[in-house]
Structure formats: C-alpha cells, structure tokens
Amino acid sequence: MTADLIAGAVAFVVVALGVLIWYANRAGKNAASVSTSEAAKTSADAQTRKAQAMAQAQADKPATEEAVLQRLGDGSA
C-alpha cells in the first residue's frame, strides 16, 4: 500500500510538472505573439504617416510655373 501511495504521488508530481511546462510554453508563445503584433502595428503606423505626408505634399504642390516662382519668392518652397 505504501508503494502504491508513493507511485501515485510521483505520478501526480510528474503530471503537475507537465501541466506547468505546457502552461509556461503557451504563455511564452502568447507573449511573443503580442510583441510581434505591436512591432507590426508600429511599422504600419510609420508607413501610414509617411503615406499621409506624401499625399499632403502632393496636394500642396504648386500647379503652375507662376505658383512655383511665387513660392520660391516667398521662401515657402
């Protein structure tokens, strides 16, 4: 009976360690996924800001030669 009790306790400890390792591995994968997503978001935000700045520069460009010369004369080009 004592041998059965010891075997049961050992089995319980092995299963508990297995569950702990599984949980830690899962938590690590989730953390890696979150950091990857945050990095992708940061990159996408930077690209969006750059595209918006380029679109605004395209919208603000002078349409005629006179407008270009006027902006150069004003010092705002």
Image (cartoon, rainbow, N blue to C red):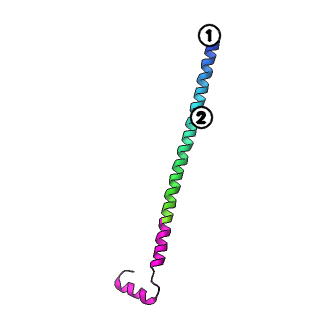
Q: Please state the total of marks drawn on the protein image.
A: 2
Answer left or right for 51 relative to 5. Answer: left
Label 1, label 2: how far apart the Cα atoms are:
30 Å
- The dominant secondary structure in magenta is helix
The magenta-colored residue range is 49-77
Q: Residue at x 50, y 65 (%)?
A: 48
Which x, y percent locates residue 45? 49, 61
Callout 2 amino acid: Trp
Q: Residue at x 46, y 70 (%)?
A: 53
Asked whether residue 63 is drawn in magenta, I would say yes
Q: Is residue 23 above or below residue 6?
A: below
Tell me the quadrant of the picture where the C terminus can be found: bottom left
Residues at circles 1 and 2 in contact by the CB criterion of under 8 Å:
no
- Which residue is the site of mark 2? 22
Which x, y percent locates residue 32? 54, 46
Q: Residue at x 48, y 67 (%)?
A: 50
Q: Is residue 77 above or below residue 54?
A: below
- Mark 2: give few (<14), some (14-19) or many (20+) Cα within 10 Å: few
Disc 2 secondary structure class: helix
Residue 2 is marked as: 1
